[in-house]
Amino acid sequence: MRSPLRHFKSIAPCIVLSLAMLAGQSIAQTPILSSLPTLSSATVGRARATLVAEGLESPWAMAWLPPVAGSTMPRVLVTERAGRMRIVTMDGKVGEPLKGVPKVHAVNQGGLLDVVLSPQFASNRTLFFSYAEPSSEGARTVVARAELLDDGLQNVKVIFGQKDRVSGGHHFGSRIAIANDATLFITTGERYSEKARAQSLDSHLGKVIHITANGDIPADNPYAKTANGLKEIWSYGHRNMQGAAIHPVTGALWTHEHGPRGGDELNIPRAGKNYGWPVIGYGIDYSGAKLHDSTAKDGMEQPIHYWVPSIAPSGMAFYTATKFPEWKNSLFIGALAGQHLARLTLNGDRVVAEEKLLTELGQRIRDVRQGPDGFIYVLTDDRNGKLFRVAPN
């Protein structure tokens, strides 16, 4: 049962909204009733995990490849944070590192990050990947496109790079989600030490970025035709987003981001909206000190769901297969600190239930994807990282 305190937190924005209406204040940007956040109160569920492969060093992301000619065996392309890409087959074979991967800033959380395939991969062999790019001025998150050959990458071209270069190795993001119109959404971090820049529209830190597959600016970007912000920005006021996926029905972008001590968030970022970091939030500083002005503020968006304490979310996938009907309307999210796979049951854009799966593994879950066979697959974040196939138990 939800505690009275948790219930109050969930209805507090509604009280604020009602008071504003009674006072005749403008409420144009105050969250409406349907967007009030829910606080995680997960139960422990059951699922079956089967080891597919191991020996991956700190794997970060995976993308499904078509089988080779003459075979029906699925393959998956895996990134390792140190700066390697490998192809893994479902019989457990881990391939040699692919050639042509650029040098990465593999420091702390930095390195080679996400990878996704072009919707036209079968004909153009194009993929997109994000990484922390090193320089003498500091590191930044960039996204490149390339063509995949049998043994490596060719025609590597950076199509987005953060304006900001910051020293250190924290909060690079980054996930890539390809929208239904083939444009790219890119999540970034605010680099921890530069959290105030998440509120600046003259910075790429703590932003959702929206570009075309060639790096151009889509016409529907909120600052595409103004001088009020960087043209690549879609939304702002984010912390460190390591999950992004396109909703299979609405086509909307969903993201999640790490909070500090508590306050991890699940959001549906809208164009030009401010998601509050570091001004509002549901967490506290790592020292235990107060961090935010409040949990809500006029002109700043609320998450649809949040976690206290933190689970440290990473990777995200909507379940769209029919293999397991009991997983219909599910959203899967990996948990690093939480060491589990979260399964959220959705009703529209609301989280109506949540359970923790794979707690018995005691593993940090870095990425989660739906496989072509209808199973869920997860990568564990470890020096001996593993790929597991997951099914209901």
Image (spheres, rainbow, N blue to C red):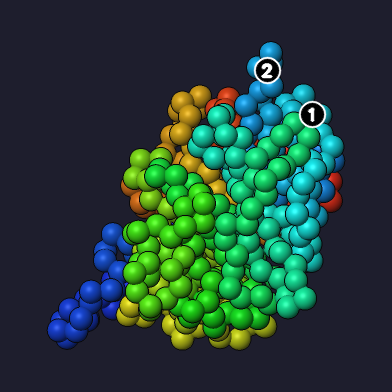
> For the point 44% across and 82% down, which residue is it?
294
Tell which residue pokes out farthest to the front in this image: 155
Q: Secondary structure at mark 2?
A: loop
Label 1: element kind: loop
Q: Which residue does the image show at 32% across and 80% down from the upper left? A: 298
Q: How many marks?
A: 2
Using a 10 Å C-alpha cutoff, classify the residue at mark 1 as few (fewer than 14 neighbours), some (14 to 19) or many (20 or more). few
Give the foreground label among 1 and 2: 2
Give coordinates of residue 385: x percent, y percent.
79, 45
- Residue 22 vs residue 345: left or right? left
Q: Is residue 239 above or below residue 23?
A: above
Of 15 and 161, nearer the camera is: 161
**Mark number, residue 4:** none
Q: Nearer the viewer, residue 114 or 340?
A: 114
Q: Residue at x 48, y 42 (%)?
A: 318
Assess whether mark 2 and mark 1 are in contact (beta carbons under 8 angstroms).
no
Residue 229, can we see it? yes
Percent x, y for residue 261? 61, 73
Q: Is residue 152 left or right of residue 185?
A: right
- Give the mark, 1 or 2, whose residue is nearer the N terminus: 2
Amino acid on which disc 1 is placed = Gly
Name above or below for residue 195 compared with residue 176: below
Give the number of the disc on residue 92.
1
- How far, Cα to Cα, is label 1 from label 2? 19 Å
The quarter of the image holding the N terminus is bottom left
State the image coordinates of residue 185 (x, y, percent, origin top left). 49, 55
Q: Which label belongs to residue 69?
A: 2
**Looking at numbered disc 2 in the image, what kind of residue is underneath it?**
Ala
253 left or right of 341?
left
301 versus 293 height, above or below: above
For label 2, the crowd category at 10 Å Cα-Cα, with few meaning under 14, some 14 to 19 and many 20 or more, is: few
